[in-house]
Image (cartoon, rainbow, N blue to C red):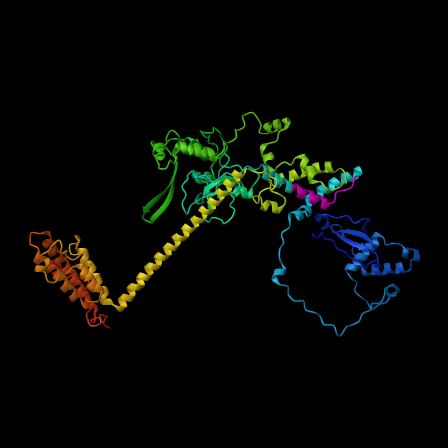
Amino acid sequence: PRRKGQVAAGGAAHRSPSPYSLKASPSRDTLTYAQAQKVVEVELEGRLHRISILEPLEVVTEDEIKAQEISECNSNKENSKQPLSPAKSAQAVRKAVTPRPQTPEKSPASHQDKMNLPDPNFRVLETFVPVEAPPLPTAYYRYIERLPEEHEVVAEYDMDEEDAAWLEMVNAGRTTEGYSAVSPDTFELLVDRLEEEAYQEARNRAPAQNTIEDDAFCCVCLDDECLNSNVILFCDSCNLAVHQECYGVPYIPEGQWLCRCCLQSPQKPVDCVLCPNRGGAFKQTSDGRWAHVVCAIWIPEVCFSNTVFLEPVEGVGNIPTARWKLTCCLCKQKGRGASIQCHKANCYTAFHVTCAQRAGLFMKIEPVREINVNGTTFSVKKTAFCEAHSPAGQESNSDEESEGRVVGSRGRASRGRSAYTESPAAPKKGRKPGDDAKREKKKGKKSPEAVAQVPQIPTNRLNIICKGIIFQRKNQFMQRLHSYWLLKRHSRSGVPLVRRLHANFQSQKNPEQPEVDEKVSAAREALRYWQKLRHDLEKARLLVELIRKREKLKREQVKVHQTVLEMQLTPMLVLLRSTLEQLQEKDTALIFAQPVDIKEVPDYAEFISQPMDFSTMQSKLESHAYRSVGDLEDDFNLMISNCLLYNTKDTVYHRTALRLRELGGAVLRHAQRQATNTGFDEDTGMLLPKSPQKRDFYGCTWEDGKR
């Protein structure tokens, strides 16, 4: 129950009166919240008295009170039996609220009061033990959603001061005509039903939202490319399509996403302060106006306060007057918005940014990297040309992109025309701006903005709304209430007066809307299912990509850990493996990679008794057959000698073996110096506690230089 600010006080009927006058009310009328905040209600002897908090109260001293009490005691019995006057009631209220301090003096008046008042009786219970109330469980406190039947009975709308003043004025006129007044509860219930009916009417007349097409494009950059980190978002109310980076949405919301216009001005259309065209992606300026995002990007003096969220738009006041006075060469309008000029030298052709997009002019934004003394700096270069100076071949080059994407001048023009609606015609010279409005008013037509703000409720629906509520002149009152409600909604830019309806503007479907075809509904359900499945698969793909990156990092970490353990446990094996890999790199033709095939060379076993190759050396290395670099060098020399013994000098194998012996010898000598300087125990293959030599083994010797 709503609190109306009433204060009740009883038991003050025998108090002395006060010189303040009270206005007695014969009946207990319900006050509005605004009226209840300005008065104090006191009920004395079954009568309701209201004291205004705005009127001053006279201060009565204690001597005046004593003199008044003495005079009351000396009065006759007839006066004492009469009901209290408003002044006495006010004094009684004053004494009930502020008790008088007791004095040791006894007067006949105080003795008379004691004789009239009954003595209080009380007794003390020694055996009484207060019972401690156990704490209630958490499940006890819960919110229960109201049923639809309860919403029809209970009014969610609360009156404000404006409503109270209007209802008081209407009730004054009804009382003058001899009709009963309308109570505030009835007013709130009727306004609540008007809001519910307007909500249902708006849902019935709202066009169905277009499904997301495959060729959807961003309204800011007119591009249809969609990346995982820069997807195209669609407004759930107006179906506006924008990139995340183009509109400043760093994170995709989980549920419903609305653009700034649908979020802050859902019913009233907004106009751009920088161009005359409508539609497209808007953001608010720092002074409360609206501007296109693309206009704020291209006009040099305008910028964004927050470069991540791209809002609010700042610098509109810094635009020079000359830019405001430029005439657009496309829409031929002057003084409506700020225009930009052609980038060509000595060309002063001006055009609005959105007009240029509608016409498909060449507009390009590219990052520029500059290297100077202070370091590397990055900037953005914006280039826009008029139709006469557009670069040659721009249309043909852009139209040749794959998969039928049309992003040339014609394609951009079609996209620009679909993204922005044509600007309204500017008023002609010699005609005042208000002439058209006056002409429409004479014809009985309303402006499109006023009609689009609040859905109109038919007269037959008004009769259904007030059905079940009985009071005199109901139809006339409903017409006046409907007009007042429309004006109040217009003053709030069409925002509903009930918070629940404002929050659930895009919620569940209207149960009273006409039934759709079963095939169409089934197709829509299937489309929603596939869209949801595609969304889930995209989430799964992103999750798998993150898992793949994580496992790759874990694999690299395991490899590093494995290398550290090998360096600690088998340092000689690590050195020998590195040396063998360097030797294999020298064999670019892979002649010594595998053993000689006996089937191809049947007489190889007659000349070579101990064959050797890199694969055999690799297997011996992994089986820990080599204890030092010398053992590896013996097998390498054996492999070279076998090749030189079997092949003649004029063969390629003989020349490759000679070259590999020279290159491999340098690698083996370097590995031997490294092992000597590091210090290895040949029996165990572990590192010695201290290195025997301090010479740098990475340096080249004279012998290596000769090689």
Q: Residue furthest bottom?
A: 126
Of residues 669 and 151, which is closer to you in this image? Answer: 151
Residue 585 found in image quarter: bottom left
Of residues 449 and 403, which is closer to you in this image? Answer: 403
**Viewed as shown, does residue 394 lie left or right of 231?**
left
In the displayed structure, 631 sits above or below 171; it is: below
Is 62 inside the magenta-drawn segment? Answer: no
Q: Residue furthest left?
A: 649
Res 284 visible: no
The x and y percentages for residue 627 are: 19, 68
**Viewed as shown, does residue 43 lie left or right of 536?**
right
In the displayed structure, 229 sits above or below 433; it is: below
Which quarter shows the C terminus?
A: bottom left
Is 189 inside the magenta-drawn segment? Answer: yes
Res 222 visible: yes
**Viewed as shown, does residue 324 lie left or right of 199?**
left
Magenta residues?
179-195
Residue 267 found in image quarter: top right
The x and y percentages for residue 683 are: 20, 72
The x and y percentages for residue 344 are: 37, 33
User: Which residue lies at the image location 31% right of the left edge and 48% below the top edge?
Assistant: 373
Of residues 513 and 359, which is closer to you in this image? Answer: 513
